[in-house]
Image (cartoon, helix red, strand yellow):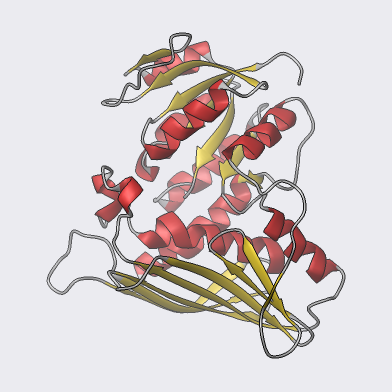
Amino acid sequence: MNTPVRLGIIGLGAMGTEVLRVATAHPGFEVVAAADPRRHPAGYPQTWIGTDSGEVLRRSDAVYVATPPAFHAEFVVPALEGGLSVLCEKPLAIDLAEGQRMVAAAEAAAGVAAVNFALSDRHATRHLEDALLRGLIGDVLSVEIRLAFVQWPREFQAHAGWLDGRVQGGFVREVLSHFIYLTDRLLGPVQPVDLVLDHRPGDDVRSEVAAWGLLRAGGVPVQVGAVAGAAGSDSYEWIIRGSKRSYLLRDWDQLFVAGGNGWEPVPLSGARGSEETRLTLFAEAIQGRPSADLASFSAGLRVQQVVEAFHRG
């Protein structure tokens, strides 16, 4: 790495606190400031930590925005217009006009703008991309996305009450968005065909309990089935079915292949992909070495448009 990038963090919930921890030990960054209205973690004496997001922008060359998504544009647009680079949590925004404003700011900015999708630099994603490029899958026949949650929000996010609110929460925005991104990246823009979002009867405040949908990506049918409150265990599955081979991505980083009847594990090489590796990609992009494994704001907007289509019915 060259001279470390002065990084600021806005939002110190589960993700902001994790990135604070990882970036503090990362050679590509010097974490100079962090802001949150309520949470001020101890143990970072070299980092200014307070409530003033403006102070974060003033001290930093780049900023990681990890607030609830309805507030992303409030911090991202001034940061980009001020010449800073931005790594933003997904979803890009809730309001489509704000998402478009963020993309316009990114296109006009001198700095780097990227969205923190967990699957953007996974070794499984790169393996799937290579399999498609080499024709190993054959004709792509369908994609299936299957999600199940014993409880929502999940235990590690229980403190974030907004995640169970209809205004900006729910697993469609928080989790399904990752798999819409993966589908968009591998097959092209995703177009809704028929979408259904189920809520608790008589409850117009809390987030969804089930999502069902048929979409298309590059002409390929994409089926979505997701539910919260189901007995069993949390489940994350993305399946691409082809005329030669099919692949199953399970629990974010376990990849299986089927050439006939039955799944076999796929040995994966290279780094798994993590906050640390995406921070490395972010630092390299700031230094003029961009990577396709760092999701753009344009990709984030395409995902947002699909996710919000569920909420519009």
Q: Vertically, is 251 above or below 226? A: above
- For image coordinates 40% across by 65% down, the residue present is 234
Q: Position of residue 180 (x, y in %)?
A: 55, 64
Q: Farthest right residue?
A: 134
Q: Farthest bottom residue?
A: 261
Quarter assignment of residue 258: bottom right
Q: Can the viewer see residue 175 in this picture?
A: yes
- For image coordinates 59% across by 45% down, the residue present is 297
Q: Vertically, is 140 above or below 230? A: below
**Which quadrant holds the N terminus?**
top right
Q: Position of residue 62 (x, y in %)?
A: 58, 23
Q: Position of residue 240 (x, y in %)?
A: 65, 76
Q: Can the viewer see residue 77 in this picture?
A: no
Q: Vertically, is 120 above or below 112? A: below
Q: Farthest left residue?
A: 202
Q: Position of residue 85 (x, y in %)?
A: 61, 27
Quarter assignment of residue 104: top right
Q: Vertically, is 52 above or below 286? A: above
